Image (cartoon, rainbow, N blue to C red):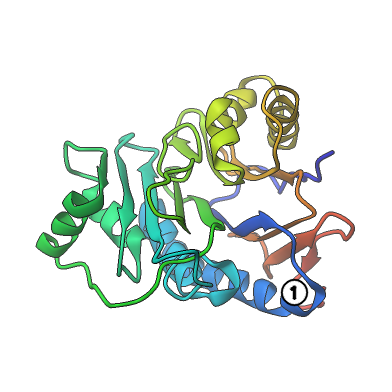
Amino acid sequence: MTDARAAAPHAEWMIVVHGGAKTIQPHEEPANREGCLRALAAGRAVLAANGRAVDAVTAAIQVLEAESAFHAGPGGAPSAGDGELGAALMDGETLQVGAVAALRGMPHPILVARALLPEPENLLVGAVAARFAAQRGVPLRDAPAAARDAVGCVARDARGHLAAGTSTGGPDGQCGDSPVPGGGFLADDTRGAAALSGNGARIDRVTLARRAVAGLREHQPDGAVHDALRTMQVHAGGGAGIILLDPDGRLGWGHTSSHFACAWQSARDAHPTVHLRRAAPPVGADKGD
């Protein structure tokens, strides 16, 4: 049912990005692969410079939002109507959450979520979120929102702190799992960090990110991912993909969709690894897919 692996334990820093649980046509594979690698490089640069996990996640998601292959921001494919955008970020050290939904004309909604992180509010929507973005100087531009794919990132920095983030676009008036803590994302230094993609309503029904992270109490990361996805299939149905880190930076990932574009690298890895589809094993970025 799932395809999951575990990375080397106790990585000093670790970062994982995903471009959505979906179907990727053969001609779309190069763009998905290269987009994941570009996003990974942006986040990796922050961590390699001893930066914070929340900043690495923010940097990686900005790149994912700009990639047309991932349909997560104004660079993505247009949805029915104008469409709306959302994003979320969680700091595993402080448990602060910044989440926004129903935004328009925002090239990088993850920047609004990042600005909201230290504020007392956790979630802003629509016009209130747009006013907050303007007050914080987050850039706006006239651009259509995206289709329904979600992108995400989880990271552990050299200090041992975790972070998770998501960004998505979709039809007007609908808010899926991406801005919901415990649904589409979660980060807690003492427990783990997860970011998801898939059927948002069904992900929320089983609080899938919470289940994946909670599973780390009894399982290695790959086992926690497998159990969380199995629970979703049994109790809610629908497809999903999960990237998961435990507090030591060990990776678990898996998906029930045909494809799940993702890439990862730790401080100990000479090269990043990329995965696109269940039928093929993950490969080093220097070997092709």
- 165 vs 173, nearest the viewer: 173
Q: Is residue 220 left or right of residue 175?
A: right
Q: Is residue 123 left or right of residue 2?
A: left
Residue found at x 14% / y 64%: 134
**Residue 263 lies in quadrant:** bottom right
Residue 261 screen position, x and y as percent: 68, 61
Instruction: Evaluate whether residue 2 shows in this view.
Output: yes
Instruction: Evaluate whether residue 48 shows in this view.
Output: no
Residue type at numbered disc 1? Glu
User: Mark 1 — residue?
Assistant: 29
Q: Neighbour class for label 1 at 10 Å: few (<14), some, many (≥20)?
A: some
Residue 28 screen position, x and y as percent: 72, 76
Residue found at x 86% / y 59%: 281
Residue 139 screen position, x and y as percent: 23, 72
Q: Is residue 206 left or right of residue 225?
A: left
- 78 vs 247, nearest the viewer: 78
Identify the secondary structure beneath mark 1. helix
**Residue 267 lies in quadrant:** bottom right
Quadrant where the image shows the C terminus: bottom right
Q: Is residue 208 above or below residue 8?
A: above
- 246 vs 240, nearest the viewer: 240
Count of numbered marks: 1
Residue 180 screen position, x and y as percent: 42, 37
